[in-house]
Amino acid sequence: MKKTLWLLALSLLLIGVLAACAPAAAPAEAPAAKEAAPAEEAAPAESKEAPTTEEAAPAEGAEMVAMPAETDFGDVDTANCDAGYDGETITIYQQAGLTGPLATILGDGFINGSKDAVEQINADGGVCGAMLAIDLQDSQYNPEQELAIYESSRTQDPKPIFVLTYGSGATIILKDRVVEDQIINLASGLNAEAFYNPPNGYTVGVAPIYPDQFTGFLQWVQENWADVKPEGAGDEIVVGVIGWANAFGAGATTPEALAWAEENGITVLPLEEQEVSPTADVTGQVQNLMVNGANVIYVQSLSFGPAQVIGTVRAMGAWDQVVIGGVNWSMNQDVINILGENASLAEGYYGVLPNYWWNDTDVPGVQAALASFEAGGYDEANKDVGYLLSYGEMYAIKDILTHAINLSGYENLSGATAMAAMEDLGVISAGGLFEIDVRDGSRAPHKAAIRQVQNVDGSEQFVPVSDFLVLPDMRPSE
């Protein structure tokens, strides 16, 4: 009886924390800057050895592997320009939710990261002398508004070269239009079908597509099952997925991903949908998965979504009975912020992270982002994926534009020549924080590391428990 009352009290406490800290209204689709990450949202082409992080304790039963101090992103020299274009301006178009129910989730990270990177790029001479400018429009992550903003932007003279979007709704609704207009959509909503149908399109991801992440996590779990499996679990891996009730939430369990799991002897239970609401109750979904034998739970949501699952599994006393992890956007600072005083509940949670994180202080790209963040005077609680994502994106755009100018000339700068430059580069470093990959028809990167929430020096940190891994390629069949 006492245990039942304790669990009920904990459940009520968590519901109160989530309701107080999360947006007041339910979103229609997740923003990918924190979906984003940051984008919804890449990893080095080849990692080099680095000393392990002494402060971070390894996950129980898993070897802790530090992220490499430097990486080879397949860099091509883009530092030099054939000529200077002082007095010219190149506008980068962004559309995201600045108001409405999702704005609280995304926060100011992506805005601040974009602004700070552009200011630094311009202070350093811009792109061959041309200055970068940002045109930011509020879409509230409503697909109809995403389309309306895009239709307005595409009529500008000169026509946009890049449009940056942050939700699966935008990725899906714009996928054919950007091909027709030859405008590159750097997308953080990582919907597989939108990226690869049509093939070789103009939608390019800042992180691996969702089924790549899902199967990559399952591959890592299977290879390390003897070390990470719950006590009493057998050899069979049974996976339960809880995803938001929208395109994002269903993005991991594609036919290709489910076929991969079956071929590799992994059972995936039917998707359990989670209401997109800060006060959603996922007790029934978790119970269904546990009753059906799940010993792995994968979370395909972000912000208050993972917090709800974490709190519910803890309250049910089932944390030690499952391996629990999720999509890259589910491992973000906002989840820790929402849990607040209960942040320790997240300890042990795994995430698929295709980018470096704030605690990778040996990485030059992280050092640059940290210096920029500190110069901006932002609160430590805002060290999220949104800032890293947008900061890196702007440096990737700088290098792409520089290479396009060198290949085709400034007067011919367009979405088409920028795409040709991207394909010539193949793998593009995004400020040393993640990569963009368009090799051999790819429209999203194929690498990520597995991290785990651990307590380091009294705070919850995202600690790497693997190096960057090559993920299974789950792009949809043509």
Image (cartoon, helix red, strand yellow):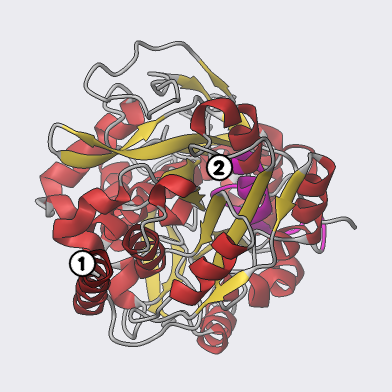
Dots 2, 1 in contact, CB < 8 A: no
Q: Can residue 83 be spotted in the picture?
A: no
Rendering coords of residue 431 (x, y %): 41, 37
**What secondary structure is marked by label 2?**
helix
Q: Residue at x 53, y 72 (%)?
A: 285
Q: For residue 387, which numbered disc appears in the image? A: none
Q: Which residues are magenta?
A: 198-217
As shown in the figure, which amino acid type bears the numbered disc 2? Ile
Q: Can residue 113 be spotted in the picture?
A: yes
Decide if residue 37 is on the left or right side of residue 307: right
Rendering coords of residue 157 (x, y %): 54, 73
As shown in the figure, which amino acid type bears the numbered disc 1? Lys
Task: Report the Cα–Cα distance between label 2 and label 1.
Answer: 62 Å
**Camera-side residue: 411 or 248?**
248
Image position of 335 with respect to 53: above or below: below
Reading the image, the residue beneath label 2 is 400
Rendering coords of residue 258 (x, y %): 77, 55
Q: Residue at x 53, y 28 (%)?
A: 468
Q: Which class describes the residues within 10 Å of circle 1: few (<14), some (14-19), or many (20+)? A: few
Reading the image, the residue beneath label 1 is 2
In the rendered image, which quarter is residue 462 located in?
top left
**Camera-side residue: 282 or 81?**
282
Q: Residue at x 49, y 83 (%)?
A: 28
Mark positioned earlier in the residue sequence (2 or 1): 1
Q: Is 175 in the magenta?
A: no
In the rendered image, which quarter is residue 405 located in?
top right
Give the mark toward the camera: 2 or 1: 1
Image position of 394 with respect to 153: above or below: above
